[in-house]
Amino acid sequence: MDQEKIKELYNYDEQYRDTIATVDEKGKRVWLFPKKPKGRYHNKRIVVSIILLSILFAGPFIKIGGEPFLLLNIFERKFSILGAVFWPQDFFILALIAISFFVFIILFTVVFGRIWCGWACPQTLFMEMVFRKIEYWIDGDAGQQRKLKNMPWNAEKIRKRLLKHGIFMLIAILIGHTMMAYLIGIEQVKEIVSQPPSEHLAGFLGLIAFSGIFYAVFAYLREQACVTICPYGRLQGVLLVKDSIAVMYDWLRGEPRGRMKKNEDRGVKGDCIDCKLCVHVCPTGIDIRNGTQLECVNCTACIDACDDVMTKIGKPTGLIRPTSYSAIAEGRKKIFTPRVAGYTGVLIVLMTLLTVFVSGRSEVEATILRMPGMMYQKLDNGMIQNIYNIQFVNKTSESIQLDVLLKDWANGTIETVGDSLTILPAKAKLDKVFIVKLPESELKERKTEIHLELKSGEILIDDIKTNFLGPANFKNE
């Protein structure tokens, strides 16, 4: 069936699309050249971006109680959040933090839509408020960028490309080093950059990889990271409801749209004059007048463009504004819906549990494991010995001297392999090897439960239990 017949049967809408704005009908990338934004919302975004980026770059240098403001050291399995150190033994607390954060994101999205993406996400902040600004400075506005792209490779184009991508690489290197500092700590990053690459080959390669990835994202991938890769962008389609606040076009006021002529009586026409400036400034290439779309990051650039036009033609601003579908269609503004109440209740429960677990966690913990590949050893003096690895974790800000004692075995002994003193550094972990010896005559079973006491002076820190293995030929008396 030909295309004209299809249009006739289905009342084909020319504005309808079944592909994302950055990919054409053949699946080829559509390179976007958004017009330089300006206006009151953009000015507010500049202030917010400066604050958030300052925090991001200063984060690795900020210490709370001697610990990093934020450290996610997955290599050493050490995590520091607001100065509080968490180890693998605190996995359930870290999991609870992650779940609480996820529920908060859901609640935030249900109420405020995708405002995080346009105003706080590092990808958007760097792309729109750093890299795009540099691009406007070097290449010019949208029209000049298109002209430069289509220009043959001459001296001007080569100079601008080298300058722009050189600056892009320097910023990507800075971002890569900052992100690495959040993973391994700023001290380790300083060591890597101040010493020969051969001394820290893995760290050096990691910095190169990070810098390369960030350069590729901001120089070439750009808005595709938000449109096709970011899982949060896909999730918002499930989370948004009619009462969610988002950047929306007031179709009741704007339609039917139509070009405006000088001294024209608009009559039944709406306020939208179909100037398409809202499309030209959009960093993801959508037409906000088609409704809420998955590419929209709520950057508010279209609001500034539309408000400027409305002011010039003597119409009220706000044709495009942060609002909800219900507020436009029904004139009803309602934020605290049953869904919001439900998510709020779940978040309160999770935060309560998190507070209880964090406040109640022990300051010193020990994990005991039998030496791999060994069961027990029978000594000539009638003793049976087992060898254990014990990992201590000190979560306090002070060093602690620990004594490990064998409980309820008067004829048994416990010995430390190596240094007999067990001193736990502040906010660190320590591995020690201990040998426990028990009289063979007192073992009644092949597997006997024993208790080890961890003491600091006279203070009992912890009581840990484990199994002691003996010969299999013993029988119960």
Image (cartoon, rainbow, N blue to C red):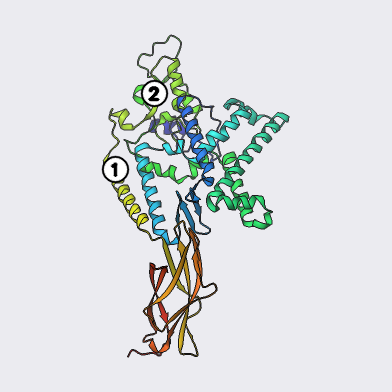
Q: Residue at x 39, y 90 (%)?
A: 474
Which quadrant holds residue 240? top left
Q: Which residue is mark 1?
A: 339
- The mark nearer the N terminus, 2 or 1, is 2
Looking at this view, is 20 or 75 the one in front? 75
Residue 218 appears in the rendering:
yes
Tag 2's secondary structure?
Answer: loop
Please provide percent x and percent y for residue 232: 43, 44
Q: Which residue is mark 2?
A: 319
* Vertical side of 134 occupied by 235: above or below: below
Q: Residue at x 46, y 87 (%)?
A: 383
Q: Is residue 329 left or right of residue 409?
A: left
Quarter of the picture holding the N terminus: top left
Q: Residue at x 45, y 70 (%)?
A: 403
Please provide percent x and percent y for residue 231: 45, 46
Looking at this view, is 29 or 184 the one in front? 184
| Residue extending farthest left | 338
